[in-house]
Image (cartoon, rainbow, N blue to C red):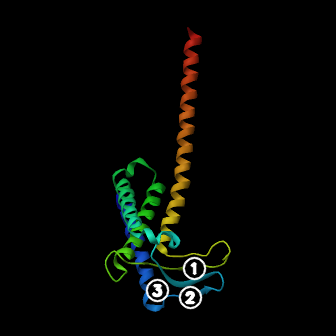
Amino acid sequence: NILIYSLIIVATVLIDYISKRIVVPNMSIGNSIPLIEDVLHITYITNDGAAFGSLSEFRVFFMVASTVAILGIGTYLLVRNKDFSRPLGIALAMIVGGGIGNMIDRIFNGETLFNGVVIDFIDFCAFPEIWMWIFNMADSFVCVGGAIFLVFYIREEVINYKKSKNKTALEETKSNDTHTND
């Protein structure tokens, strides 16, 4: 499992890095190329904040918090990987890889170290009234990983609850059988 999760983290970082290295030298900031007109465009922008450009005034705090989260989730994933199902591990690996991908931009994609901006370019513009943000592959991996984690975590909790409930019912049945035989 550790090998699989490590490979997912590395693949996620590479996919994010390569996709950004395709966009940056071939586009100017603000340019947009429609892949599917009015649905999906490649629009090159930069982001100096957190998700969707928020928290840019708290940049240092956000970078520290992100680093702690990446290290915490990554350590948990690699140390406790036998404690959860493979889908949960894959989800955590995607979250860590996406976090690393954007952290690479924040560290190296600026005039000085640790003063960089995140490169965003995926512009899903089909519903501008409800979705106006531009994102990148790292963001996609974090969101998809988060969704997978949530679904499978809830699923595992429901399964564990049912097992616990069935075990309690079985113990009560055995206890009742013992008392009726007395």
Amino acid identity at mark 1:
Asp
Above or below: residue 165 compared with residue 176: below
Which residue position is annotated with label 1?
Answer: 123
Q: Position of residue 144 (x, y in %)?
A: 52, 65
Q: Indicate the quadrant containing the N terminus: top left, top right, bottom left or bottom right.
A: bottom left
Give the image quarter of residue 125.
bottom right
Label 2 close to label 1 by CB (< 8 Å): yes
Secondary structure beneath label 1: strand
Which residue position is annotated with label 2?
Answer: 32
Can I make out residue 11 in this image?
no
Secondary structure beneath label 2: strand
Q: At x 36% / y 77%, what residue is drawn?
A: 115
Q: At x 36% / y 81%, what residue is drawn?
A: 110
Amino acid identity at mark 3:
Val
Give the image quarter of residue 67.
bottom left
Q: CA distance from mark 2 to mark 1?
A: 9 Å
Give the image quarter of residue 90.
bottom left
Amino acid identity at mark 2:
Ser
Label 3 close to label 2 by CB (< 8 Å): no
Above or below: residue 70 compared with residue 42: above
Number of the front mark, 3 or 2 = 2
Q: Position of residue 36 (x, y in %)?
A: 63, 84
Mark 2 crowd level (few <14, some 14–19, many ≥20, 10 Å Cα):
some
Q: Position of residue 180 (x, y in %)?
A: 59, 12
Q: Position of residue 14 (x, y in %)?
A: 39, 75
Can I make out residue 134 in this image?
yes
Q: CA distance from mark 3 to mark 2?
A: 11 Å
Q: CA distance from mark 1 to mark 3?
A: 13 Å
Which residue position is annotated with label 3?
Answer: 23
